[in-house]
């Protein structure tokens, strides 16, 4: 499994991967069907440090566990445009709060779902230039990753 994911920061948040990965890093992985999961775990709920899943758009998407430290208050239900992202939270987020997230392409999604049904993350930040299809694919990847990860504790 080959990947590249490093910490990044903007005016709204700082995002730090569970384990920084650079292009060329080689990881042992479980590979089956349309999924790959690193054997190494880290971050929230012992999540594999990188996964790759195929979604209904027939593309493979990587997902990485990370911690997002928020730099501004976010009101529930409001959409905040800041730092090149559209940010939405279903519950109150205070400046300085840390959220366990999965980074999927240009999307950052809370590990936790908004409700028991688990169909959507309670926190989402998407780069301003992401298309509706890219956002839907990121959320689909998030759902597959939450449901199918092999290293559950």
Image (tube, rainbow, N blue to C red):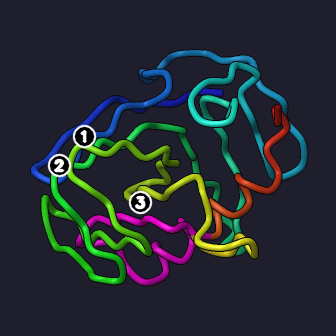
Q: Residue at x 67, y 45 (%)?
A: 52
Per the image, the residue denoted by label 2 is: 71
Q: Is residue 91 above or below residue 18?
A: below
Q: Residue at x 49, y 27 (%)?
A: 18
Q: Residue furthest right?
A: 32
User: Which structural element holds mark 2?
Assistant: loop
Per the image, the residue denoted by label 3 is: 107
The residues colored magenta run 121-139
Which label sits in the foreground, 2 or 1?
2
Per the image, the residue denoted by label 1 is: 14
Which label sits in the foreground, 3 or 1?
1
Measuring from the top left, give residue 16's x and y in whole percent: 36, 32
**Front in this rendered view, residue 99 or 87:** 99
| Numbered tag placed on residue 111 in the rendering | none
- Neighbor class of circle 3 (other Cα within 10 Å; few <14, some 14-19, many 20+) is many
Q: Earlier in the sequence, mark 2 or mark 1?
A: 1
Q: Residue at x 25, y 67 (%)?
A: 74
Location of the N terminus (image quadrant): top right
User: Which structural element holds mark 3?
Assistant: strand
């Amino acid at each position: 499994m080959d990947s590249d994911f490093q910490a990044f920061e903007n005016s709204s948040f700082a995002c730090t991967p569970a384990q920084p990965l650079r292009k060329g890093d080689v990881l042992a992985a479980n590979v089956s069907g349309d999924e790959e999961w690193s054997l190494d775990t880290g971050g929230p709920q012992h999540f594999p440090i990188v996964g790759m899943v195929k979604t209904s758009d027939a593309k493979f998407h990587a997902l990485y566990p990370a911690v997002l430290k928020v730099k501004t208050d976010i009101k529930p239900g409001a959409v905040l445009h800041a730092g090149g992202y559209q940010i939405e939270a279903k519950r109150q987020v205070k400046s300085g709060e840390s959220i366990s997230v999965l980074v999927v392409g240009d999307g950052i999604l809370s590990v936790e779902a908004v409700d028991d049904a688990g169909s959507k993350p309670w926190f989402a930040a998407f780069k301003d230039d992401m298309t509706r299809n890219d956002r839907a694919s990121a959320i689909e990847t998030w759902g597959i990753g939450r449901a199918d990860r092999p290293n559950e504790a």
